Amino acid sequence: MINKRINFFVPTLFLLALFAASMNPAQAGAAAPTVEAAWHTLDALDPPISPEMHARLGSLAADEKLTVIVRLRQQANLPDAPGLSRPARQRAALQALRATADVTQRSLKTRLKFHLRQGKVSAFSSFWIFNGFSVTADADVIRELASHPDVLSILPDDVNVAPASSPLAFTNPEANLALVNAPALWSSGISGQGVVVASMDTGVSLSHPDLAAQWRGGTNSWYDPYGEHPTTPSDTHGHGTGTMGVIVAGDGSGASLGLAPDAQWIAVKIFNDQGSATSTAIHSGFQWLLDPDNDPNTADAPDVVNNSWGFASPGCFLDFELDLQALRAAGILPVFSAGNGGPGTMTSFSPANNPSAFAVGATDNSDAIASFSSRGPTSCGGSTGVFPELTAPGVNIQVLAPGGQFDYASGTSLAAPHVTGGLALLLSAYPDLTLAEQENALLNSAVDLGDPGPDDTYGYGRLDLLAAYNWLTANVTPTPLPTATPTAIYTPTPTDTPTSTPTPTDTPTETPLPTDTPTSTATSSPTATYTPLPSPTATQPPKVLHIADLDGSSVRQTRYQWKAMVRIVVRDGQGKPVANAKVFAKWTVGVTGTPTCITNSNGVCWIRRPNIPNKVAKVRLTITKVTRWNYTYDPLLNTDPDGSSNGQTILVKRP
C-alpha cells in the first residue's frame, strides 16, 4: 500500500520550525436537472482493491475493522454556467451533486445499514461532494463492497502528519504586500469588503486580536470534523493561524500583514490536535465548504479557498480531484501551495498538481525563486499547463502566531495565501467574476520572471494585484471602482532564503473518525451584492476573430523526455488583439490531449505539452475552435506571417 501523508509547505527560518510535517448552480427559477442527466460514469482499468489493500485486509483480525473511502463509478455532471451569478452557480452545483448521490447510493446504503445492525460495520457516512462513502467495516464487508458493480475504488482512509513545534495596516505594509501592489488597491477603498475566504488547515486561533474581528461567526463559519473544538475556532498547531493572517490580518504588529483586512473568514480544521488527518475529514471539510449551513438555498459558501497542504512527496494522487471539481463548478477557486520540493524539476505535489487546483510557488522579495519552491512539469490527471500557475512572496514573511504573537516564516504555504488574499481584493471590486475571469486576471497580469513566457519555475510570473485589477477594468463588463495607482514605489531588497526543508519522521497511526457529515442548521444571507453579467442582444452583433500567428518551440526536459510549446495569437477582423479568448486545440502524432488556453491583453496564450518521449520526433497541434463572448471564430481568416504553420495546424519538432 502506498503510504499517503500530508505535508505543510513552510520550511523553517530563524528560530522558527514553523509547520513542517507530512501527509499527506442553476439560476433562481431555472428547471432542475433531470436525474438521468445528473451523472457520468468513471471507468478504471485497475480493480477496486489494490494488492496492497488485499494484503492489509488479510492481516485484520476477525473482529478488527478498517476505515476506507469508497468511490462510486457514477459521478455528477457538474454544470458549466458562466452566465449565472455566483450564488446561482453554487445552487446548480449543489443540486447536481446531491441529486446524483441521492439516487445512486440507495442500494449500497441499504446494504451498509444491514451490516451495521449485524455489527460488521461500526460506522459509515455518505458524501455528495464526490459520490461515495466513508465506511468502517470488517474485511468481509469491504471485500463485498469491492465486488459491487457500482464501486470504482476502495482506498485507505489513514493519512497522517506530525507537525513540528510552532513558535510562531493600511498605513505600513510589509515588503511582501507592497511588492504585489496590495496598497494600491487599498488606496482606492478596496480591502476585501463583502468577501468570505476559507481555510482548510490546522484551524485558526480566534483568540488572536488580528483575526477575531474578521471571523464571520455562527455555526456555519467553523467546522471541526474530529469534534475536538466543535463550536469555537482553535489552532493548537499554529500553521492555519499563520496562513490566515497573510490573507486577512490587520496591523496589530505595527505593520499591515494581511492583503484583505476587511474580508471575513471561515475555516475547516482538517488536522486534529495531534497533527493527524484522515481522508474522511478532508472530504467532509470540502463538502462542508460548499454548504456550511446544510441548506442549499442560502448562499453561505466562501468565495475562495486556501489550501497550504499536500501529500508527503512529489507525485500524482487524485484522491481529492472530484472535490476540487465540485468547488470549481460552484465558482470557488481552490488555491494550493505548490510544495517545498525544489530546487529540482518534476517536484510537483498533489493536490496542487491536480487539474482543478491553482498552484502557487514562492519567490523572495527580490523576485528570485525560492530554492525550496516546487517546479514542474507535471501531467498529473491530464494537466497540460505549467506548474506552478503563479508565484508570490513566500520568504521571510511576518505571520501571526498563537497567543497573539507574531513571527517570521518561509514556504509555499505562505505564498498561496497571497493569491487567496489578492483574489479577495479583486472579488471585493468585482463580486461576480467567473473562475475564468479570476484566473485570467491573475495570469495575464503577472510579472514575467525567468524564461520569457510561462515556465515550470515561475509559472506565468509573480502576482501583481494592481495589474490584475487594471486588467479587469479593461476586460470585464461590470463598472468597477476608479482605476488605482500606486501610492509609492517599492524597491525590493535581497533576503536570505532557507537552505533546508524539514523532512517527515512520523509513521502512520489510526485516527478516530467522524461518523457523519456536518448537520449545522444556522442560516445566513449573502454579504455581497451580485450583478449578473449582461447577455448578448440583437443590438450587439458578433464580431469576428481568428488565429493571427502560431509559433512552435521545444526544450529538453530530461535525457528521455522533451516539451513542446506553441505560442498562439488571436486578433479581430481589424487586426487588434483579442483578450480573454479561449482557444481549444488537439495534440496528435505521437501524443494525445485536448488542451485549452486563454489569451492575455496582447491576444497571446501558450499551450505546452510536457513529458514527450524521445522516440517521438515531432508532434502536431491543431486549433479546433476559438470562443469569446460576442465574437465569432472564422478559421478561413487564420494566418501565420512567418509561414511556420497554416494558421490552424503546426508541427513542433524534438529539440
Image (tube, helix red, strand yellow):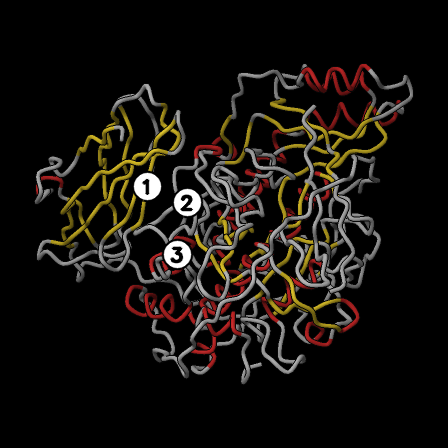
Classed neighbour count for the residue bearing mark 2: other residues with Cα under 10 Å, few (<14), some (14–19), many (≥20) = many
- Quarter of the image for residue 105 reads top right
Q: Which residue is mark 1?
A: 596
Query: Could you tell me the amino acid type at mark 2?
Result: Asp
Q: Earlier in the sequence, mark 1 or mark 2?
A: 2
Give the Cα distance between marks 2 and 3: 10 Å
Q: CA distance from mark 1 to mark 2?
A: 17 Å
- Can you tell which of label 3 and label 1 is closer to the viewer? 3
- Tag 1's secondary structure? strand
User: Quadrant of the image for the C terminus?
Assistant: top left
Q: Nearer the viewer, residue 271 or 519?
A: 271
What type is the residue that disc 3 sits on?
Gly
Compared with 42, 417 (above or below) is below
* Residue 62 percent location from the top left of the image: 90, 17
Label disc, if present, on residue 461 of the rendered structure: 3
Q: CA distance from mark 3 to mark 1?
A: 19 Å
Residue 334 in the figure: left or right of residue 21:
left
For mark 3, give the secondary structure. Answer: loop
Q: Which residue is depicted at the point 39% across and 30% down?
A: 611
Pointer 2 or 3: first along the chain: 2
Tell me if residue 130 can be seen. Answer: yes
Q: Which residue is mark 2?
A: 456
Q: Amino acid at mark 1?
A: Thr
Toward the viewer: 148 or 439? 439
